[in-house]
Amino acid sequence: MDIITITFAHFCAQAPKYTFNSRVAMKSNCEPSKWAIARVTGLRLDDDNIWNYTIVFDYPLGYCDELPESELAGEEEFLCLN
């Protein structure tokens, strides 16, 4: 697979916290052990310089959603909480 490097020239642009194929969990009000686990399949930087992630949940039907970074937890966070 080819490696693609993207450089942002805008002074406000920050690197995304999660990258393609990263395992993440969708944060919710329930206990962390019950958070829905997913993989990042897409990235989008909106007009306010906030990263939005397209994620596919680890469900048999592969439900997907787009969520901002603030609603996601990285693998190291949800593995520690289980």
Image: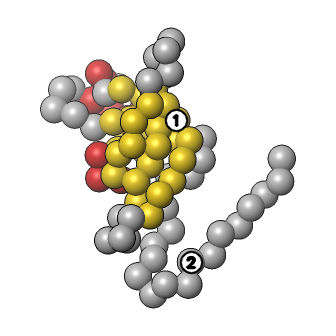
Relative to residue 4, is residue 44 drawn left or right? left
Residue located farthest toward the left when viewing the structure as drawn: 29
Give residue 25's quadrant in the image.
Answer: top left
Circle number at residue 20: none
Q: How many marks?
A: 2
Up-down relation of residue 39 to residue 12 (above or below): above
**Residue 68 at x, y = what percent?**
34, 52
Relative to residue 2, is residue 55 drawn left or right? left
Q: Secondary structure at mark 2?
A: loop
**Distance of label 1 from label 2 (alpha carbons):** 24 Å
Residue 76 seen by the camera: no
- The amino acid type, in three-letter code, at marker 2 is Phe
Q: Earlier in the sequence, mark 1 or mark 2?
A: 2
- Report the residue at 52% width, 42% height from top: 40
Up-down relation of residue 54 to residue 13 (above or below): above
Circle number at residue 39: 1
- Report the residue at 40% width, 54% height from top: 52
**Residue 18 at x, y = what percent?**
50, 52
- Report the residue at 27% width, 29% height from top: 32
**Residue 9 at x, y = what percent?**
56, 84
Q: Secondary structure at mark 1?
A: strand
- Within 10 Å of the Cα at label 2, are there few (<14), some (14-19), or many (20+) other Cα atoms? few
Nearer to the camera, 33 or 13: 13
- Residue highlighted by disc 2: 8
